[in-house]
Image (cartoon, rainbow, N blue to C red):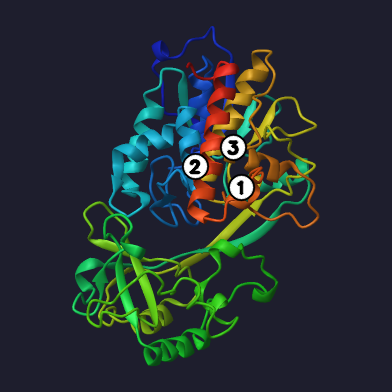
């Protein structure tokens, strides 16, 4: 294999610094590279784009968001909001980019995907200690490397990982369709967020009982793309195709992605029987994706069935939903809580391959892997995270023995309970988040990661 170096400015490379490698320039990879470079290491960031693309990636930039432009809740009293705040404490490059490129999405942190990728790419490529190396990696590294090749690792490199680590598990997840804003019938749909929380950035398509039941019947009987033994595929619950979820029962999606709670149809002044929400896909608000409508239906079936949704009768679909392969390690027993390959000499993994699920979670794991590799090379002990913070909880998940290991996203349930019982959910979550953030800030200060 021939690797093409894209950065040739010799003045930007300090040859006195140690050289480390990061494989993959997704969210986890750029965070690992950023953490290492900011600690004085010369980083070779290897990325196979634009020479080769995975089935789900199309854009040339780093940290490409594929499934959604939402980085989940911005509220620090929520699990993902708490995790993002922890990342900010640790100088996250993706959080910097998100602040620069965010778009309105109620209480969520959503970004313009292209601008977000461009912002991350600019910060990474302009760092004096980061060298970009384009080309597919085909051999397993020997030392001083963070592997962050993501859930769509190339077949060749995945085989090398399998040879070194044992058989990785595979599952499939799905992306939702996107429609143009101008094709949505706003005489039938309306802007709102649940319980009027934040700005009314979601378009809501309300459905009556009769409309819902007709839609449901077509959804469960629609034709899917044929995959290998569909019944045997491991599909991560958070990315369950809507048609698969619907087949669990007629109420399944009405209590899932079509739940009407917290919404009032202005035409009737009543809560609808079911609702489909659409979220901005770009800053201009010209594109919207169907929230929770990841799907494996054939394109023609998507057009036919999803056009039955109130307000989408004449919707123009600019992207249909697709499914693609994801791969993750059976990390317990392979990785420790520092994301290091247990029987290796300074080989770390980061991102969804480790079994953390989600964009934010992947980025957070990249920060920890990068910091810990830097500390190991400097002869320091690994970063000790308080068990009350979300980053530590995710690290604990991927490194704790589990006979049926599955990906895990940030959630309050993986944090230690409070010593006192708080019945009010909002207050309980706020107390848990405040405790974890305070503990993390103190720990980072004590270990010299941040200053008071």
Under tag 2, what secondary structure? helix
Which sits in the foreground, 134 or 344? 344
Mark 3 nearby-residue class (10 Å; few <14, some 14–19, many ≥20) = many
- Frontmost of labels 3 and 1 is 3
Residue topped by disc 2: 82
Q: Which of marks 3 and 2 is nearer the N terminus?
A: 2
| Residue occupying the point 40% across, 46% down | 74
Left or right, 55 with respect to 60, comes to right
Residue topped by disc 1: 356
Mark 2 nearby-residue class (10 Å; few <14, some 14–19, many ≥20) = many
Q: Earlier in the sequence, mark 3 or mark 1?
A: 1
Compared with residue 132, is residue 318 higher up or lower down, i.e. above or below? below
Q: Earlier in the sequence, mark 2 or mark 1?
A: 2
Q: Count the labels in the image.
A: 3
**Marks 3 and 1, how far apart in space?**
15 Å
Q: Where is residue 57 in the image (x, y as percent from the top left)?
A: 45, 52
Left or right, 258 with respect to 361, comes to left
Which sits in the foreground, 4 or 422? 422
Left or right, 359 with respect to 378, comes to left
Q: Quadrant of the N terminus?
A: top right
Under tag 1, what secondary structure? loop
| Residue occupying the point 49% across, 42% down | 82
Q: Is residue 128 visible?
A: yes
**Marks 3 and 2, how far apart in space?**
8 Å
- Frontmost of labels 2 and 1 is 2
Mark 1 nearby-residue class (10 Å; few <14, some 14–19, many ≥20) = many
**Marks 2 and 1, how far apart in space?**
16 Å
Pointer 3 and pointer 2: residues touching (CB < 8 Å)?
yes
| Residue occupying the point 46% across, 37% down | 85
| Residue occupying the point 23% across, 80% down | 188
Residue topped by disc 3: 389
């Amino acid at each position: 294999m021939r690797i093409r170096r894209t950065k040739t400015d010799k003045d930007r490379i300090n040859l006195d610094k140690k050289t480390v490698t990061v494989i993959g320039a997704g969210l986890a990879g750029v965070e690992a590279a950023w953490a290492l470079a900011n600690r004085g290491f010369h980083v070779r960031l290897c990325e196979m784009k634009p020479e080769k693309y995975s089935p789900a990636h199309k854009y040339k930039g780093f940290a490409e968001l594929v499934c959604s432009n939402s980085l989940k809740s911005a509220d620090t009293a929520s699990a993902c909001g708490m995790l993002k705040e922890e990342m900010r404490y640790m100088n996250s490059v993706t959080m910097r980019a998100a602040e620069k490129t965010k778009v309105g999405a109620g209480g969520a942190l959503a970004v313009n995907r292209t601008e977000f990728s461009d912002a991350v790419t600019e910060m990474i490529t302009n760092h004096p200690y980061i060298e970009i190396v384009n080309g597919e990696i085909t051999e397993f590294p020997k030392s001083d490397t963070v592997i962050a090749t993501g859930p769509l690792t190339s077949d060749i490199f995945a085989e090398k990982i399998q040879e070194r680590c044992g058989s990785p598990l595979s599952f499939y997840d799905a992306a939702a369709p996107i429609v143009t804003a101008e094709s949505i019938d706003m005489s039938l749909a309306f802007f709102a967020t649940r319980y009027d929380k934040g700005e009314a950035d979601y378009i809501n398509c309300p459905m009556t009982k009769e409309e819902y039941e007709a839609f449901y019947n077509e959804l469960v009987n629609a034709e899917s793309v044929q995959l290998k033994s569909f019944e045997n595929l491991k599909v991560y619950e958070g990315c369950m195709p809507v048609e698969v979820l619907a087949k669990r029962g007629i109420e399944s999606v009405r209590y899932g992605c079509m739940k009407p709670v917290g919404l009032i149809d202005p035409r009737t002044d009543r809560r609808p029987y079911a609702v489909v929400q659409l979220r901005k896909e770009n800053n201009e608000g010209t594109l919207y994706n169907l929230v929770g409508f990841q799907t494996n239906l054939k394109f023609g079936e998507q057009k036919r069935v999803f056009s039955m949704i109130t307000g989408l009768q004449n919707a123009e679909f600019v992207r249909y939903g697709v499914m693609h392969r994801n791969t993750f390690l059976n990390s317990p027993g392979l990785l420790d809580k520092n994301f290091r390959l247990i029987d290796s000499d300074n080989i770390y993994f980061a991102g969804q391959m480790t079994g953390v699920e989600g964009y934010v979670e992947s980025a957070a794991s990249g920060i920890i892997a990068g910091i810990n590799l830097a500390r190991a090379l400097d002869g320091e002990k690994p970063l000790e995270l308080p068990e009350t913070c979300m980053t530590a909880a995710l690290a604990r998940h991927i490194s704790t023995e589990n006979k049926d290991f599955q990906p895990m996203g940030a959630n309050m349930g993986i944090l230690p309970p409070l010593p006192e019982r708080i019945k009010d959910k909002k207050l309980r979550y706020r107390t848990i988040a405040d405790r974890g953030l305070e503990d993390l800030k103190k720990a980072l200060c004590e270990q010299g990661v941040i200053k008071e």
